[in-house]
Image (cartoon, rainbow, N blue to C red):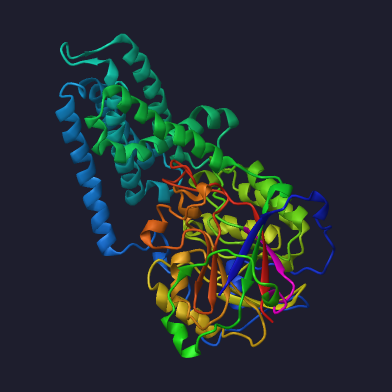
Amino acid sequence: MSLMREEEWDDSDHTPEIKSTKSINSHSLSSLQHQPLSDDFIKFIEPKSQIPNSNSNTLGHPVKKFALVIMVILAISLPVASYVIANKVSPGGLDIPLTAFGLSSIAMALFIVYFYKVHGAKPYIKSKPIVILMALSFLFYSLYLVLYAMYLVRPFYDEETKEYSGISWLIIVVVLYFHFTVFLQYSLLAQCSLRSKPYLYLISYPSSIFFTSIILSIPLYLFVGFIPPKISSFLMLLPFALGLIGIFQTLRTRSPNKWSVKEIYVKSSVEEDDQLITKRSMKRVVSKTPKDTEIVDFKQPLSIIQIADPHIGPMMSIERLQEICENTVKLNPDLVLLTGDFFTTESFNPENSLEIALSPLKKLPSHKLFACLGNHDYEEGCLEILERALESINCTLLVDRCVLVETRIGKVQIVGFDYRKNQRQEHITQVCSSYPPIPGVPRIGLLHDPGAFKFIPPEYGLITFSGHTHGGQIGLNCLGVNISLVGLTGMPDHSLWQNGNNYLYVHTGQGCRSFLGTMVLRVGVPTEDSLLQVFFEN
């Protein structure tokens, strides 16, 4: 069983100095696939069999047909039921909200379609799937916006005169401002450009807070109509309060002396007979302090910092990612693992935004820097930008490749898995068979999608580092409760997991993304800044 202990790094005097060492030249994605590299610190391992390159099906998320059907049913039935309830409890209460928000939202959605099709900065942005996604998601949000406004001003509605009192219009004007910020942010995401600080504070942040508030308010409409108007109005403020908490949790970056230190103990064998390994199921590992008799069986730790899902854009400025990278350099770990998803659509202008943001990592020797690809790194133009940025910091990109690295604790085998939407089991199995374990050498895997971890053969024996889930995005992580939206789907959402001889650490991530930018904030799932101390059993 794997053991993990977490504490806080609170002594800045322990920050190690950076030592000079021999470095290697990084290779682009294309050269990685064809030209192995070796020197005193790192050597590429030739695969036992040829692994096909990524195909056009890498974009998107793997969703089972049954889950997709359930999502469509809920997307249709929930608003219908909510409107039936609203019309029953207050027949005339929907009139003004529908006039103020409903009709205008239709016009706004049509403008979004026009703006993306005509003024989209890239062919990808102009494509039919993206245009449909943005228009329909805006309309879906607007459906609940009408209900949100109605219940918010419900105490000021007179059932006899069928009119709202004066103060309700002030509230409507405030809601209209937030609604306008959502519309403007939705529209200008098509321009694929980072925005100024005034725009962030006046448009991006308010739009994300309000959009998140509307999403969080959806469950309320099934019962809020049956409670007194003043209480229902108060309840409508709770999602907004959670949105305000979300902007703090999404933007939070800690100084190095406030990073958490997590100890992970990886056993190279299991207590059961090897024939029973394949029967073990994936499970979250409960953190606990190992016994003194167990600690002596492990080597000295390998210190690792993971940068996961930075998503440069409205919530991850160039300066903020620079700060994260600078803090990483100050802590000087043995390995820095970049596990994919560097982009939002705003990352493209300026084109060197990622290169500037990652530039502090140049101070680390290149045999400490390794990266894999995420699903958003396959969007149009992203690979070229990513290759240049990784090359500028001498970081090795592993796309279905394996390297043997000389570290402070000796040789370590690192396998980088490509991101795949389709045929994930076949792909993972083929990569593992192409790079069999080296006896006596600790193994590390880079796999952006933790949902594919279950396909790694249980006897393979490695610890995998993933991201992708943003810790579950919305959940109760900050309260120490392992419940999140992503976790409810059965996918590993955060922390440490085990399946047979394999271990998985799902990083909560430093950034997040939704609807091309960051419209849905983290709520209850703060960003993660951690130093991992990984102990491998002798």
Q: Is residue 21 left or right of residue 410?
A: right
Q: Please tell me which residue is depicted at 30% across the width and 28% down the height of the picture.
A: 232
Q: Front-most of 144 and 415?
A: 144
For the question of whether residue 19 can be seen, the reply is yes
Residue at 77% from the left image edge and 53% from the top image edge:
330
Direction from residue 527 to residue 368 in the image, left or right: right
Residue 381 image offset from top left, x and y in percent = 51, 55
Residue 110 placement: quadrant: top left
Q: Is residue 456 magenta?
A: no
Q: Position of residue 133 (x, y in %)?
A: 33, 47
Q: Is residue 342 left or right of residue 159?
A: right
Query: Residue 393: image x %, image y %?
Result: 71, 58
512 w.r.t. 445: above or below: above
Q: Is 72 situated above or below 165?
A: below
Residue 356 in view in this figure? no
The quarter of the displayed image where residue 66 is located: bottom left
The boundaries of the magenta stretch are 295-306
Q: Is residue 33 above or below residue 518?
A: below
**Residue for point 66% across, 42% down:** 319
Q: Residue at x 71, y 63 (%)?
A: 394
Q: Nearer the viewer, residue 81 or 387?
A: 81
Residue 370 picture location, percent across and down: 65, 66
Count of residue discs: 0
Q: Is residue 302 magenta?
A: yes
Image quarter where the C terminus lies is: bottom right
The quarter of the picture where the N terminus appears is bottom right
